[in-house]
């Protein structure tokens, strides 16, 4: 008895209907889907794409970001970005007038609500495409705010972030489409059945606030941004003060698409700030803000969760955790060491998904190259890291630059940490001189071996190029520690290396108990740090590291509400 | 590339697979679905069903509830139920030992998790059926704890509550089924594609706490109870101290079904308390409690929301609001007055969905019986109420008994409220003597007319048999006040009477803006107070009256998490 109400028409819906079908299907089957090639190769993107993108990036430097001058502003400018590679960006952004900006956002809601889920999804895809055309510009902006190496900046900052955006659009779209627009309801009765028409209308929560982070300014912001947008909300994007430019570019593109599509630009606004202004706190306390998406440190994340509950705002947080690896045995030692070394080295461990705690039994590790003792395994891993990062020119394309003083302090503290915990520095975190950026502080991963009893050393997140080799009494204890520490302190990733089905089964149980995703025996070109949109959930929401996952139904279902009107027919 | 993993088998899944299909389909199409006849007629349920149910109820009175003696208990008994109709129930319940009970609940989780969504749903249906077989016993228990009239106790306490249970089961089931159990993921690569098997495992949050209310002990508890159960959680049911018996019967039935099905009874436990013990607060602060479902007053509800956020627990609340009616015009005055009078009278306005604020323009109401002034409309409504409740014997079957002193105080305060707000008592809240229960305090609805400017009178929930006739300057103002008061103070229901398409359209806009469901021109046997499972959402989550709705995706999607394990194939 479902009577499908007419879907509002829009040229972008005609244009993007096939994409919407593709992403609906990819989400349902959790299959591989990517809209943009991940390789920044000239063969893929064209010979001049890189140069044009670089020029577009450089055109931003040292001047006001004029393309956002149409936002409500108090007339002042903010901005204090300095590249982790050295250069000061010198971009200044018009400060958002919060009263006027939030009023404008609320004022834009009604037409956006009435556009309906499909038109909103099509407009969101168009925004994604508009950003996608600027992937090289974005890559430079991400590189010089996060300190990521260039290729990673391109991939994670552009195509992979846009895949996550599309995933959020798909998840939000299908969740809304599960509610029929209109039905005739019929209840049997003695004489005539009771018949009522019931119209179900999707309404937004209000204004979403997206609080960006320094290390993945776009990748971690897009899921919340697009999940809120597609479900009918307006969004204010509050970037990390040291990583504004990538989101300024994003917001500029979004506003242009919205205007071209006949909607109010105020649906997406940038609230930039200089270092230390505390704008996230101010915005989170505004009544207009109904949804908050946050990536960052745990203490502010927990404050946001409480503040949101006090005001009835939804809060999605990704905070921090202890990413863990259990090494039991392997039939591919070379692949194991190479994969682990890469995971540790990639962006100097400054990924929220990078492994930190590697549990190895005191009895050592059985491998295809024979038995390795605990210390031998550590030394072999150290060698693999050293080999991978030996050539400075190649190393910096993997390591990137350290993003802040805390990371550098963590890298410098290995000897102290080892001494305090009666451990051993297996590998110092080596300084690498960047051939092009002398001021960049580049660090290769270091390793400290400690006993499992020294929880003081390894049960805090030590963000950056630091890994702990934790000596356990057995693989069983390794798995117990993985589950216990993740349950208590959180974890974004876990992995296991074992040739034993029994151990792998136990690892799956431990991961399920701990509420963390598990990668098994990664020895090739898939790394525990990396998750694929539409297929791998990023985070689970089941442990303290994050209260949400990119992108499950829980991440989108509460961002809208359904209002029924019913009448007899 | 979806590889469906084998669904765990269970005899109950074979038995209930057809029901699961029916409820999946009813939810998707939002069509009428009911598993149990709503009429307590002997022709439907059999000649002796009522007597057997009454005897079963009476067998509980004046003694310990022995069937729950197998719960972990500290050996003490609690219970202080007194029927709003007069009699003391005298049932005592073994107090739950919280440490042991919560440990038992957690201990029961793993096998329940591993049973999978379909088996859990089938077991939940079996619980629903087990409770359904006790509908007459339950009806008496609901009647003598809530004060509802018998037929309503039967319908809302039994079949309708069970329909809401089935709806929650369906919503939780399909939300879990949207995640494939296992897929092979294939990413194109230069040579061989990357192929990985990814298993997705549904895991629960932990222990759910359901905090019941006095007026609808089962109807408001079942959605949370079954939504948590079907998604793999254990549940501790904490009934209102004055409405324990209906949930004790429910928990007893659930535990028996669980045990018979091979699961741990500790998946459902009763935490009864005597009046004033504050057990809800104690339980809400327990680390084991990961989900809280609450129906009750706003201040404790808001405390729960904050407490939940502090601990990372999900909190679903239904609190209070200003249910509003806009009267503009009608072509069926008799139907309008009859419907409104019934809505006001049903259970003496002690439904969270009962209308309180009736906005009528000062210019009066155009009807099929001619034009009525504001005062004339009020008087005609008062007459309709008086006529409906004139015969005490029939009236008590509609009004039931008042549930507590606050309701009685509200009913007694009409003259004072009217005087303070320069209003007029249009109809006193009449005392009705119950022919069978002399001690019952039965009240017919009263009506107070006030000017729209006297917000002091009508912008607080006045729970019970009290309606405000609010004189507005126009229907436009009526709609603005509806939207404004619901946005600020919340509202569970709204309705409008108008012959004008323009007004109805404006009312739909107002309802969408306010975030409240709208009923239009109800003049027959559907009442604004009543919502149908699978079709009408109860609450919206879009205004302060409730942060959740029975049952949308948002009500179920966060109750479970998905844990991936992936490996190369």
Image: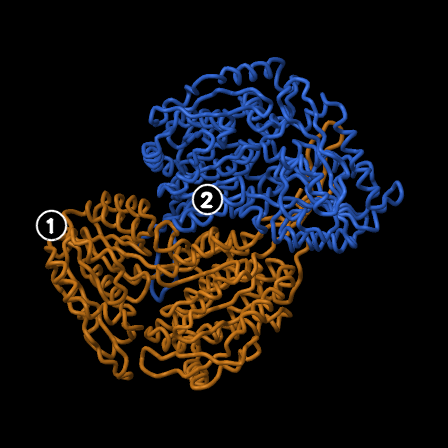
Chain colours: A blue, B orange
Helix, strand or loop at label 1? It is loop
Q: Which residue is denoted by mark 2 in the rendering?
A: A176
Nearest to the observer: residue A555 or residue A75:
A75
Q: Position of residue A362 (x, y in %)?
A: 81, 50
Disc number for residue A432: none
Q: Is residue A275 left or right of residue A348?
A: left
Q: Quadrant of residue B467?
A: bottom left
Residue at the image point whose x is 25% and y is 44% from the top: B506
Nearest to the observer: residue A419 or residue B217:
A419
Q: Position of residue A498 (x, y in %)?
A: 79, 47
Q: Position of residue B94 (x, y in %)?
A: 51, 79
Helix, strand or loop at label 2? It is helix
Q: Position of residue A493 (x, y in %)?
A: 65, 44
> With respect to residue B457, does A462 lie above or below?
above
**Cα separation between marks 1 and 2:** 41 Å
Chain of the residue under the numbered disc 1 shown in the image: B
């Amino acid at each position: 008895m479902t009577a499908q109400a007419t879907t509002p028409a829009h040229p972008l819906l005609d244009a993007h209907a096939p994409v919407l079908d593709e992403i609906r299907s990819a989400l349902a089957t959790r299959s591989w889907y990517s809209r943009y090639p991940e390789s920044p190769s000239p063969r893929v993107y064209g010979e001049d794409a890189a140069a044009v993108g670089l020029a577009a990036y450089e055109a931003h430097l040292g001047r006001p970001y004029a393309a956002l001058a149409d936002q409500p502003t108090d007339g002042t400018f903010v901005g204090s970005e300095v590249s982790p590679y050295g250069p000061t960006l010198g971009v200044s952004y018009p400060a958002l007038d919060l009263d006027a900006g939030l009023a404008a956002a609320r004022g834009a809601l009604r037409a956006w609500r009435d556009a309906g889920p499909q038109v909103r999804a099509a407009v969101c895809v168009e925004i994604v495409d508009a950003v996608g055309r600027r992937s090289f510009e974005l890559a430079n902006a991400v590189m010089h705010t996060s300190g990521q190496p260039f290729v990673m900046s391109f991939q994670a900052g552009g195509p992979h972030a846009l895949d996550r955006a599309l995933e959020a659009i798909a998840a939000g779209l299908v969740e809304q489409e599960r509610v029929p627009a209109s039905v005739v309801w019929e209840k049997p009765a003695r004489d005539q059945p009771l018949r009522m028409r019931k119209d179900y209308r999707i309404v937004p929560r209000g204004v979403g606030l997206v609080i960006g982070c320094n290390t993945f300014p776009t990748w971690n912001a897009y899921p919340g941004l697009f999940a809120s947008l597609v479900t009918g909300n307006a969004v204010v994007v509050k970037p990390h003060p040291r990583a504004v430019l990538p989101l300024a570019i994003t917001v500029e593109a979004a506003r242009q698409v919205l205007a071209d599509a006949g909607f109010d630009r105020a649906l997406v606004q940038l609230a930039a700030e200089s270092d230390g202004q505390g704008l996230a706190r101010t915005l989170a306390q505004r009544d207009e803000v109904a949804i908050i998406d946050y990536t960052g440190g745990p203490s502010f994340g927990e404050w946001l969760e409480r503040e949101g509950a006090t005001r009835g705002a939804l809060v999605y947080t990704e905070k921090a955790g202890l990413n863990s690896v259990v090494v039991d045995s392997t039939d591919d030692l070379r692949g194991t060491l190479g994969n682990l070394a890469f995971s540790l080295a990639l962006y100097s461990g400054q990924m929220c998904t990078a492994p930190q705690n590697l549990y190895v039994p005191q009895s050592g590790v059985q491998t295809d190259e024979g038995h390795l003792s605990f210390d031998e395994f550590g030394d072999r891993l150290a060698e693999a890291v050293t080999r991978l990062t030996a050539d400075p020119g190649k190393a910096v394309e993997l390591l990137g630059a350290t993003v802040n003083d805390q990371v550098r302090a963590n890298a410098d503290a290995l000897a102290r940490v080892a001494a305090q915990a009666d451990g051993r520095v297996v590998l110092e975190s080596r300084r690498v001189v960047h051939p092009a950026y002398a001021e960049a502080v580049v660090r290769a991963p270091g390793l400290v071996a400690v006993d499992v009893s020294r929880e003081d050393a390894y049960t805090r997140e030590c963000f950056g190029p630091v890994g702990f080799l934790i000596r356990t009494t057995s693989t069983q204890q390794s798995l117990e520690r993985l589950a216990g520490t993740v349950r208590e302190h959180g974890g974004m990733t876990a992995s296991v290396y074992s040739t034993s089905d029994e151990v792998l089964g136990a690892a799956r149980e431990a991961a399920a108990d701990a509420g963390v995703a598990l990668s098994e025996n990664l020895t090739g070109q898939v790394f525990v740090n990396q998750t694929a949109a539409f297929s791998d959930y990023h985070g689970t929401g089941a442990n303290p590291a994050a209260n949400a996952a990119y992108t499950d139904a829980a991440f989108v279902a509460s961002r809208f509400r359904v209002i029924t009107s019913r009448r007899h027919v």
